[in-house]
């Protein structure tokens, strides 16, 4: 409209200008007007040509499919560690190549620092809530997620995570419960009732009769027509339009531990590919949430080796999804984090080569520690061995004493293995000068060391130009809803 009006005004002026031939000058002026309008409003389609050079996007603003990818805890520091370790200082992560970039604030309703439940809720529903709450308001009213809007509109929907599929991020898109820790069996039931077409990840324990008042929830999924997979081979062979894949009772394994534990789990990239394969069978389009969950877990443990491996695994999944979107068109890919964890940063003093040589996660190391008989202490010998074997560190007597103190709560009880791994990580990060919050600061945090740092948002495809500037996490699903014409 604006351009047409401009052309009309220019033409009108030319007609009334004496001493010029209206025809020649008019043409010239119009050409100028249109080229300057091109500079002001670059044609968005030019970024989105498919392999034949055709315009893949018929309607650039309204995506048919949305692939929503969450690097849990993935701040700029985590990205920088992954980039340096994997590609060197001149290299790039794939996600850095996406054309539209924004930053987002992540605070929750009751805290300047969010946990993954309130963070996931903001990204799923466009509303802030309290830490620990899954898609309910602070006064416990249920809130609709963007995924559910797609479902109501007759589209396919799916959630994929390397965490338990009943944990915060996938839960926020598929369920509503007031307490993330107590609600996981309920979340699994709501995923069945909500007809979520693809569910892939860990957390099989919450679908088993022992956590479902004797009900075989997996059997109920099968009755509803779902294929069921427990490992990567079964997932590859699964047919049909609905798929439940549960590959671990708890979190899926850290990438770095796969060889050591002889894992038969699919990778995040394989799950992403399968999710797209199943969901794209429907003709109406789909919404798929993919979470690289263990970037957060590695960050909690100040485990820069796993921050690297998990972020690269996530980046490869982003690459797969974006390339699929390039081939197929009408797809919006949004890549972002729900919050940052542990203030991870790439310091100049960090010993990259030593950190790259560590072959297992800190959680795996914690599992190798041995307690002194009838005592609450890990033996000095086992501590010494673990640090030497897996991290090539000669730990001092002082550090051993400090470690045994740090792994106990106020009443002297030793933390669960995961948190013991956090303390191992703090010693390793300190030894190799990795940038991270220290152990005392983490222990004062109700989120185990999350920070309020701005997080990155990247977007590609239909409507991606709407993701610009400094946003708030609640803006993100609202932008998608607006593109789709949904009320959120
Ligand atoms: Zn976390």
Image: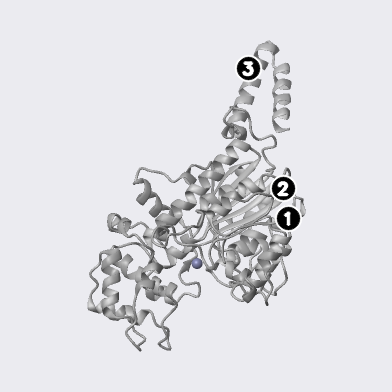
- Image position of 344 (left or right of 19): left
Residue closer to the observer: 369 or 480 = 369
Q: Residue, x 30% and y 70% (percent of image)? A: 386
Whether the residue under disc 2 has CB within 8 Å of ligand 1: no
Under tag 1, what secondary structure? helix
Q: Is 171 situated above or below 49? A: below
Residue closer to the observer: 421 or 472 = 421
Characterize the local packing of mark 3: few (<14), some (14-19) or many (20 or more) Cα atoms within 10 angstroms. few
**Cα separation between marks 1 and 3:** 49 Å
Q: Disc 1, disc 2: CB below 8 Å?
A: yes
**Cα separation between marks 3 and 2:** 40 Å
Q: Disc 1, disc 3: CB below 8 Å?
A: no
Characterize the local packing of mark 1: few (<14), some (14-19) or many (20 or more) Cα atoms within 10 angstroms. some
Residue 396, given in percent of the width and then of the height, sits at 23, 75
Under tag 2, what secondary structure? helix
For the N terminus, the image quarter is: top right
* Sequence-first disc among 1 and 3: 3
> Circle 2 is placed at which residue position?
484
* Of marks 3 and 2, the one in the foreground: 2
Residue 280, given in percent of the width and then of the height, sits at 66, 45
- Image position of 284 (left or right of 447): right
* Sequence-first disc among 1 and 2: 1
* Sequence-first disc among 3 and 2: 3
* Of marks 1 and 3, the one in the foreground: 1
Q: Tell me the number on the disc at residue 28.
A: 3
Residue 404, given in percent of the width and then of the height, sits at 33, 81
Q: Is 400 situated above or below 11? A: below
> Circle 1 is placed at which residue position?
149
């Amino acid at each position: 409209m604006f351009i047409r009006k401009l052309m009309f005004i220019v033409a009108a002026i030319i007609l009334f200008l004496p001493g010029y031939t209206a025809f020649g000058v008019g043409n010239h002026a119009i050409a100028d007007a249109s080229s300057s309008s091109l500079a002001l409003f670059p044609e968005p389609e030019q970024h989105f040509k498919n392999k034949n050079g055709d315009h893949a996007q018929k309607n650039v603003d309204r995506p048919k499919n949305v692939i929503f990818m969450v690097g849990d805890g993935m701040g700029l520091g985590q990205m920088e560690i992954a980039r340096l370790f994997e590609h060197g200082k001149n290299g790039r992560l794939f996600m850095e190549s996406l054309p539209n970039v924004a930053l987002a604030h992540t605070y929750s309703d009751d805290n300047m620092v969010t946990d993954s439940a309130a963070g996931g809720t903001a990204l799923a529903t466009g509303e802030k809530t309290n830490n620990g709450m899954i898609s309910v308001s602070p006064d416990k009213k249920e809130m609709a997620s963007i995924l559910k809007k797609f479902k109501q509109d007759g589209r396919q929907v799916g959630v994929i995570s390397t965490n338990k599929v009943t944990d915060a991020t996938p839960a926020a898109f598929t369920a509503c419960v007031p307490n993330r820790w107590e609600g996981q069996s309920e979340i699994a039931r709501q995923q069945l009732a909500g007809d979520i077409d693809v569910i892939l990840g860990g957390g099989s324990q919450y679908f088993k009769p022992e956590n479902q008042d004797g009900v075989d929830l997996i059997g109920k999924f099968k009755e509803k027509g779902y294929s069921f997979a427990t490992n990567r081979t079964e997932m590859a062979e699964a047919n049909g339009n609905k798929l439940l894949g549960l590959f671990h009772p708890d979190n899926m394994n850290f990438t770095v531990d796969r060889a050591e534990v002889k894992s038969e789990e699919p990778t995040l990239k394989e799950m992403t590919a399968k999710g797209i394969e199943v969901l794209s069978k429907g003709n109406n389009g789909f919404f798929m949430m993919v979470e690289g969950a263990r970037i957060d877990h590695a960050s909690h443990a100040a485990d820069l080796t796993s921050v690297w491996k998990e972020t690269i695994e996530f980046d490869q999944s982003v690459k797969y999804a974006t390339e699929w979107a390039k081939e197929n068109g009408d797809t919006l890919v949004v890549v972002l984090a729900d919050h940052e964890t542990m203030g991870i940063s790439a310091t100049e003093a960090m010993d990259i080569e030593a950190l790259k040589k560590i072959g297992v996660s800190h959680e795996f190391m914690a599992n190798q520690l041995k307690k002194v008989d009838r005592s609450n202490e890990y033996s000095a010998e086992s501590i010494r061995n673990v640090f030497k074997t897996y991290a090539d560190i000669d730990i001092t007597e002082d550090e051993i004493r400090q470690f045994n103190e740090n792994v106990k709560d106020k009443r002297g009880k030793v933390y669960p293995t995961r948190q013991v791994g956090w303390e191992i990580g703090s010693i390793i990060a300190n030894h190799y000068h990795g940038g991270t919050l220290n152990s005392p600061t983490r222990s004062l945090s109700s989120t185990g060391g999350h920070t309020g740092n701005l997080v990155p948002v990247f977007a590609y495809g239909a409507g991606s130009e709407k993701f610009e500037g400094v946003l708030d996490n609640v803006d993100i699903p609202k932008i998608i809803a607006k593109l789709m014409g949904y009320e959120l």
